Amino acid sequence: MAKIEIRTQAGICPSYVYRPTGSGPWPAVLVYMDGFGIRPAMLEIGERLASYGYFALLPDLYYRSGPYEPMDPHVAFTDPEKRKVLMERFFAFATPANIMSDTRTFLDYLAAQPDVKAGGIGSTGYCMGGFMSLTAAGTYPDRIVATASYHGGRLATDSPDSPHLLAPKIKSRVYVAGAIEDSSFPDDMKERLRDALVKGGVVHEIETYQAKHGWVLRDTLAYDAEAAERHWQTVIALFDSTLKP
């Protein structure tokens, strides 16, 4: 892993780069973090992607809020004061518009790396990042060819920035994983998203895991080891079939 700094229109974004062993070029994957920010459990996603032969870029989407100590997900939502800080200091600036502006810079960074395979890239995201991953697919359809979203919330709402509204623009293959217990992505929202993707002609799969919202990251209360491994099987199958022809 190498920690780097990427200059965006808004400032300096600390980011983490993971290169597989051996010699490239390798297919690239852009990783969108969850709402608890950069911490060991999030960094492990990049490490494991590299172990499968992918050049992974994990940017810190909270850079606009300044430096911060690694968050404990067990505390961040249950402690009222820490939850307030999370919402007001971090979430407030990690808007879809801001992150999509940043994403252009992230994509340009990947395209400029000599050890990144030319052509389209993959993206994956978790919780908040799942929303961003799907949004990026519709915002940069000529650059993202494989899109994964794990326990992403608010994927098909009445909001003008709802990801499902971008379905007609999406060209990538899409995999969306929801949970049986997830108020941010209930069954009716799954159907609304599915309908939009079908009408948009998007090759996609929406799967519901027998798990709770947030099951992938090992430091969350919802972590489910079996479902997390299923996540790895599906995301690597998606990327292998699209980025490693």
Image: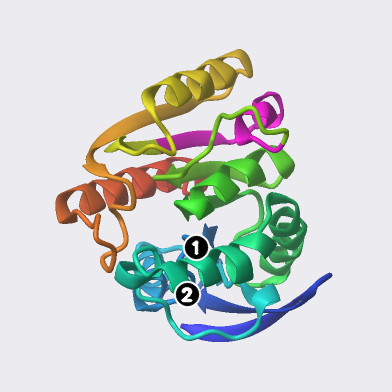
Seen at 53% across and 34% down, the residue is 173
Q: What stretch is highlighted in magenta?
A: 161-176
Please tell me whether mark 1 sits on a helix, a strand or a loop: loop
Q: Do the residues labelled 2 and 1 touch (CB within 8 Å)?
A: yes
Residue 221 vs 226, above or below: the answer is: below
- Examine the structure image and report whether residue 169 is included in the region drawn in magenta: yes
Residue 176 vs 188, above or below: the answer is: below
Provide the residue designation for mark 2: 38
Applied colour scheme: rainbow
Q: Position of residue 70 (x, y in %)?
A: 43, 81
Q: Position of residue 80 (x, y in %)?
A: 42, 67
Labels 2 and 1: the sequence-earlier one = 1
Mark 2 vs mark 1, CA separation in Å: 7 Å
Report the side of 34 relative to 15 (left or right).
Answer: left
To which quarter of the image does residue 158 belong?
A: top right
Seen at 23% across and 57% down, the residue is 223
